[in-house]
Image (tube, rainbow, N blue to C red):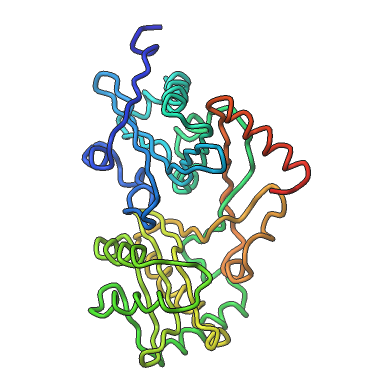
Amino acid sequence: MTNDYITNKWSFTSFEKIIDDKNISNNEFSFKFYQTNLESNTKHFYSIYENNKVKLYFHGVCYDYKKFKIIDSTYSGFIIPNIHKKYYIKNSFIINKNLSKFLKKSKFSILILRPYPLKIFFNDLSLPHESNFKGIKENNGYIILKKNFFTELSYNQKREINLGLKNISKYNLVTEKSDNCLDILKKLLKMDLKKKIDIFYIEKIYENSQKGLYRIRILLNDDYIICVLIISVRPGISTQTFNYTSPDYKKDFINKGIHFLIINELFEKNIIDLFVFGDSIDNNDGMKSVTAFKQSFSKLSLLSLKIYHPLNIYGYLFIFLKYIRSLFKYD
C-alpha cells in the first residue's frame, strides 16, 4: 500500500469550490446540498478528498443533539464526479476510513448516512461503497411517485383530483413568476401554521425559486390564502417543501388538485424521474407513519438504509443509548 493511500487527504472546502468542479454531474447535487440554507442557524459541512488529480467531496449538516455533535448527511453525503467513480469504488474502504478519522478530528461524535433517493432510484454503482460504514443500521425508505402515476390511482382518487382541478379554476393562481408572489408569502408569517416559519425562510424560498430551485403555487380567493404548495426541484428529482390548505377549503380537494398540477407538469416536461413525498418506511410501523393524504397518491416505496456511525467514545455512547431506547420502543 502506498503512502498516498495511508495519508488522510480529507480537508475542509466550500460550497463554491464544489459547485465550480465541472466534472460533477447535476444528478450528484441533492436539494439538501444545492439550495441555500432555509434556516438561519443551519450549519453545513463541506469536505474534499484529493489525491493527485482525483477529487471527491462530502457534504452534511451539523447540529448538536444534547451532548452529542452530529454530522447528518441525509439526502446528500458523497459527491463523486463520474470520472472518479471507479477510483472511489476501488479505494472506498481506505477513503471512508480516512473520512471517519477526519470527522473525528473535527470533533464530531456521530455520522448519519442516508443516501440521496435519486442514487437509490438509479441504482448508482458507488452506493454500496458509500454506505459501507459500521454502526446501527435501520431499514427506512421514501414514499414516491413515478411518471404516469395518475393512471395507477383508484377511481375515487382520480375523481377527487378532478374535483380539485375544477375548484381550482374558480380562484386566482399565483406562481413564483408572479410579481406579488413574495408579498403574499410574507402573509404566511401572520397565520397560525403547524410548521413555524420566519422571514428568512420566506425570502430564501423566493430567492431560490427565481433560480429554478422551487415551484411555488398559491391559490387566492380575493386576498384570502386558500392553499400554498412549495416544491423543491433538482434534475431528476423533486420533493414537497411546504404545504398549507385553509381548513375552510379542505373538503374541496383543492390540495390534491394543486399537487397533481405541479407534479404532473414536472413529469410531463421530463424535468424529473422521481417525486419524493417523504419518509415512508421505518423499523416500527412502515406505512402507518405516512399521512392518509400521501398514501392516497401512492403506496410505492423506495427502500433506503439509515446508518448511525460512531466516531468517538461519545458516539459509541450515543449508539448504546439508542439501542437501549429501541428495546423499550421510545424511538
> Where residue 282 sits in the image (x, y, percent)?
65, 50
Q: Is residue 79 above or below residue 271?
A: above
Residue 26's x, y, as percent? 31, 46
Residue lying furthest right: 328
Q: Is residue 22 left or right of residue 146?
A: left
324 or 300: nearer the eye?
A: 324
Q: Is residue 71 left or right of residue 306?
A: left
Residue 297 at what x, y percent from top left?
56, 69
- For the point 35% across and 61% down, the residue is 270
Counting labels gives: 0
Q: Quadrant of the N terminus?
A: top left
Residue that appears at 51% across and 66% down: 149
Give coordinates of residue 313: x percent, y percent. 58, 25
Q: Seen from this angle, which residue lies furthest front?
A: 67
Q: Is residue 212 above or below residue 84?
A: below
Write the residue at 52% across / 32% down. Answer: 109
Residue 228 located left or right of residue 176? right
At 56% from the left and 29% from the top, the residue drawn is 310
Towards the viewer: 272 or 15: 15
Residue 292 location, quadrant: bottom right
Q: Nearer the viewer, residue 130 or 163?
A: 130
